[in-house]
Amino acid sequence: MYRDETTGAAETAAADGAAPGGPHLGPHPGLHLDHLLVSLQLTDSAFPSGFYTLSHGLEGYVQQGAVDHDSLAALLHDVLRHGVGPADATALALAHRAAAAGDWDTVAATDRRLHATKLSREMRQAATRTGRQLLDLAAEVFGAPGIARYHRTVTARRAPGTQAVAAGVVYAATGVPVRQAVAADLFAFCASFAGAALRLRLTDHRLAQGLLRRTAPVIEETTREALARSLDDLGATTFAADVMSARHERAEARLFAS
């Protein structure tokens, strides 16, 4: 059972479906398995949110000759630590907690803050396109009132509907613990990044799986740090990635939307 500094033993056990000091003995152990199944469904490339149509800036690096097979892992780890972690993963955690508490003003404020921190047009568009699609589909698939409520807020243009905040709302509404939600979404990002690397011929299928496994400790680290941040800490510091994205917007040919 994984434990970090942000949770006590009792909270950790409850989040993992176990009583403190022993296995889960409650009347509905299947409910905790359902949390895992929700995570698997949302992170599956077959879930049509559009998340897996993005290169997450990788195509821009390839176009500029700034990444190759040998530097791919270092780039992914840097993006996690300095980009996705302080921005999207942090926003997901904040939105999850606020949605679980019924604090929809804070959910919307987190959404607006995350959207404002995305400096390039294509990154903002990619975030809101996938986020709105996620809310629309999840409202139908899971039928939870919280998802439908925030979907109406986004549809009415009272919040941008970024992917990370939408995911936080969906995970909270389906009862997935916040740490599991953040880690699952980070893994989905890494799997999408590895898939883009495959299509851009930076790796092959076997090596891509090795890349994902080597990234697992970075996902744990990034999850732990995201859970400890406040709204004031939200924002990425990936200046090179912002430049690559800006150049990618003006490329003559693009395989990916970002």
Image: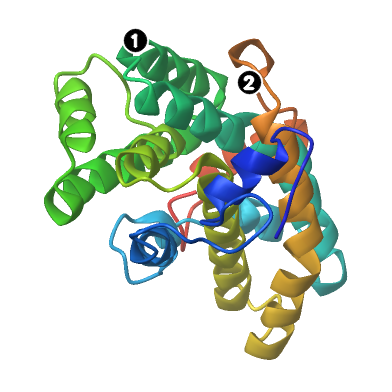
Q: Amino acid at mark 1?
A: Asp
Where does residue 201 sit, x and y in percent of width and height? 65, 78
Residue 192, can we see it? yes
Where does residue 105 sit, x and y in percent of width and height? 34, 10
Q: Residues within 10 Å of mark 1 (few under 14, many from 20)?
A: few
Rounded to the nearest whole Å, what is the CA distance between mark 2 and mark 1? 17 Å
Looking at the picture, tell me which residue is in the foreground, 31 or 253: 31
Give the vertical position of 5 relative to 133 (above or below).
above
Q: Which residue is mark 2?
A: 234
Give the vertical position of 7 relative to 230 (above or below).
below
Specify the quadrant of the image occupied by residue 149: top left
Looking at the picture, tell me which residue is in the foreground, 83 or 27: 27
Specify the quadrant of the image occupied by residue 8: top right
Specify the quadrant of the image occupied by residue 227: top right
Residue 10 in the figure: left or right of residue 108: right
Q: Which numbered disc covers residue 237? A: none
Give the vertical position of 60 relative to 94 (above or below).
below
Where does residue 92 sit, x and y in percent of width and height? 50, 34
Q: Amino acid at mark 2?
A: Leu
Residue at the location (68% across, 23% down)? 229
Where does residue 114 sit, x and y in percent of width and height? 51, 23
Q: Secondary structure at mark 1?
A: helix
Q: How is the image coloured?
A: rainbow
Give the vertical position of 160 relative to 24 (above or below).
above
Looking at the picture, tell me which residue is in the foreground, 135 or 118: 135
Residue at the location (69% across, 35% down)? 7
Q: Quadrant of the N terminus?
A: bottom right
Nearer the observer: mark 2 or 1; the answer is 1
Q: Which residue is mark 1?
A: 105
Disc with the residue nearer the chain's start (2 vs 1):
1
